[in-house]
Amino acid sequence: MAVFYSPYPMKGFRSFLVMITYVAVFLFPFHFIKTKYDYKECIKIIVYSSFLPLLAVSYDIAFPESSTNRNGFRLFSTFSHPNVFAFYLLTVVSVCFYAIKNELFNNEQLFRKQCWMVLLFSLVCILGTKTRSAWAAVALLVLVYGLFKDKKYLVYLAIAAAVALCIPSIQDRVFDLFEGNDPDAFLDDYEQLNSYAWRKIIWANAMIKYWDSPIWGFGTESFTYYSGAFFLIETEVGNGAHNTYVQFLFELGALGFAALIWLLVPTFIRLWRLRNLAGGNIIVFALFLSYCLIHYSDNVFDYLIYNWYFWFFIGAFLAYNKVERANEHKKAVV
């Protein structure tokens, strides 16, 4: 509906079609996962398809000048931006971790070894992307697993964090959050603000504008259109929200925001209920929790490949558990 009153109707319609693909890849596994073997093949597809982008990282390393900006050297492999690569790898790490901890793959030692190699190299690459929200998401993933399944992972997390902070480039990205937080001091040069500081400014200004149309919002893709006027520094091209929750409130109003919550919360609850049914299930719940966290600071729904892989995995996991419940019910009836 919001496409019809969007200031960018064609761009809004394109965004609508992109969102439809996320629904499609989520539903796809429900149509063809009929056995345990089908589900295992889905997991292997995700892991094996990561080989090419992980190999392509060598190009970033060989030609660092093409991967360097004002934030220094950042890995992005075959992706358009380091953030997209980082979030894609978050899904890959979670799938590998899940496969290692799940009993389904106990007899597939080669695949488990491959998962360990992909997992460890992906973690190194996530550090190389310098995407702080991805770092936080990985930390949350390990934290949840440590709290609910294996306490020694809390020790691993603390050690890994301490080692990472010994790397100068990692230190710079973390300590950058404590500098450039005064918008008045940099009124004429918002690039002097750290990325989180200018995000908070644009969110605050968006929420002031939001009250002009709180129920319906201003239409799909309207945030970029209006942000050129209400942001601290006026620009001709505008800025993205870098916060899905703020974006949905602004563009789709209270109704659209309620629809977003209706999408996320039932899935969240379902994954929570499945957390103890099999080894590694808590990892899927933690991944979804991380996904919700990432929406706080990035334009997540714009990251096509990341959402395809993420929703495909979530759909496959839920489809497999649906099949297992049906099989258990048949056995009980017999």
Image: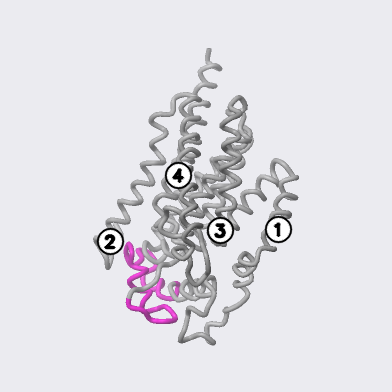
Residue 52: which disc? 4
Q: What's the amino acid at mark 2?
A: Lys
C-alpha span from label 3 to label 4: 17 Å
Which callout, 2 or 1, points at the residue further toward the start of the chain?
A: 2
Expressed as whole percent of the image width and height from the top left, the position of residue 213 reads 36, 70
Q: Residues within 10 Å of mark 4 (few under 14, many from 20)?
A: few
Magenta segment range?
207-236
Looking at the rendered image, the disc whose residue lies closer to the viewer, 3 or 2, is 3
Determine whether label 3 and label 4 are within 8 Å by CB. no
Residue closer to the observer: 79 or 235: 79
Which callout, 3 or 4, points at the residue further toward the start of the chain?
A: 4
Which callout, 1 or 3, points at the residue further toward the start of the chain?
A: 3
In this view, 96 is above or below 133:
above
Residue closer to the observer: 163 or 27: 163
Expressed as whole percent of the image width and height from the top left, the position of residue 227 reads 38, 74
Looking at the rendered image, the disc whose residue lies closer to the viewer, 2 or 4, is 4
Q: Residues within 10 Å of mark 2 (few under 14, many from 20)?
A: some
Question: Magenta span has 327?
Answer: no
Q: Tag count in the figure? A: 4
Q: Which residue is mark 3?
A: 128
Q: Which residue is mark 2?
A: 11
Asked which secondary structure carries label 1, the reply is helix
Q: What's the amino acid at mark 1?
A: Val
Q: What's the amino acid at mark 4?
A: Leu
Which residue corresponds to the image point at 41% horizontal and 61% vertical from the top-left? 248
Asked which secondary structure carries label 2, the reply is helix
Q: What's the amino acid at mark 3?
A: Gly
Looking at the rendered image, the disc whose residue lies closer to the viewer, 1 or 4, is 4
